[in-house]
Amino acid sequence: MKGLVVENLVASVEDVEILKGLDLEVRAGELHAVMGPNGSGKSTLCHVLTGKDDYTVSGHASVHGHDVLSLDVDERARLGLMQSFQYPVEVPGVSLRMFLEEAAAAGGREARPVDELADQFGMQPFLDRAVNDDLSGGEKKKSEIYQMAVLQPSVVLLDEIDSGLDIDAVRQVAAAVNELRNEDTAIVMITHYNRILEYVTPDRVHIMMNGRIVESGGPELADQLEQGGYEQVRKRLGLADEPTSEDRPTPVSELFTDTPFDV
């Protein structure tokens, strides 16, 4: 199947399970929103799929039918798996244009025209500046979506793309996400709130709690969640409260670096 398939995914740090048998299927051409409270494992799902260290992992995850859990980070990227980050990092000395040209060449994938899409995404002023140098939060996140549009990944993970943005920036980022959507790309958009869903209509909404997806539905599920909150979902489904941060160890790499992966 074209797209992303996750089956019975389990991920642990030390002796603590974070993902506890998670299942998710996103076909090419679909955008799925994954919502959940802090500590439910949403970002861990992204880290595990893209190959971050620190986790003990079992289960199955595939991109276009190719198992990815046994692959290195760069091999997963070459299959077309790409993630945006909550806190995009600056890359001094490397212009956005240079980065995109080198990334396209290294990935062996056909890239779309850098300048043409820069006009479309409003990124022309930033092409010859260092990646994310002196950009606002909204500009950084719009830049990441622009990078995806150029590099044409087939499976996209948007990890809290609306985090820390004001309402105008949310609209701009949402417009960029809508530009990214096409029949060949599967998109997973992780978010705490439904405000970005006022501008991006998902095909499916999933509620994630305690390391599992506990409920799925159409866009109306996000509206119900906004009205009743996660506590109402817990009561309706008979679920226990999420573990506190004291119950869950933080991977060492997340304590000492803002970069996506340790070197």
Image (cartoon, rainbow, N blue to C red):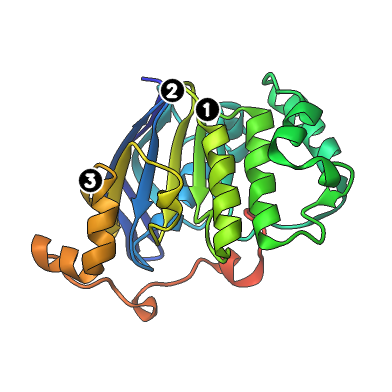
Q: Point out the frontmost of discs 2 and 3.
A: 3
3D distance between C-alphas at marks 2 and 1? 9 Å
Q: Point out the frontmost of discs 3 and 1.
A: 3
Q: Which of pointers 3 and 1 lies earlier in the amino acid sequence?
A: 1
Question: Looking at the picture, how far across and down is residue 151, in whole percent?
Answer: 67, 29
Q: Is residue 245 above or below residue 198?
A: below
Q: Residue 27's quadrant in the figure? A: top left
Front-most of 174 and 111? 174
Give left or right: position of 110 versus 19: right
Q: Point out the frontmost of discs 2 and 1.
A: 1
Residue at 43% across, 56% down: 191
Q: Is residue 180 above or below residue 209?
A: above
Is the Cβ of the residue at disc 2 closer than 8 Å to that at disc 1? yes
Q: Which of pointers 2 and 3 lies earlier in the amino acid sequence?
A: 2
Front-most of 84 and 255? 84
Three-letter code, disc 2: His
- Judging by the rendered image, the residue that carries numbered circle 3 is 216
Q: Which of pointers 2 and 1 lies earlier in the amino acid sequence?
A: 2
Three-letter code, disc 3: Ser
Three-letter code, disc 1: Ser
3D distance between C-alphas at marks 2 and 3? 22 Å
Residue at 38% across, 81% down: 246
- Judging by the rendered image, the residue that carries numbered circle 1 is 154
Q: Secondary structure at mark 2?
A: loop
Within 10 Å of disc 2 (Cα), the crowding (few <14, some 14-19, many 20+) is some
Is the Cβ of the residue at disc 3 closer than 8 Å to that at disc 1? no
Question: Looking at the picture, how far across and down is residue 210, in whole percent?
Answer: 27, 62
Give left or right: position of 26 versus 137: left
Q: Of the numbered discs in the image, which one, if any, rests on residue 64?
A: 2
Residue at 60% across, 50% down: 172
Question: Looking at the picture, how far across and down is residue 125, in whole percent?
Answer: 84, 45
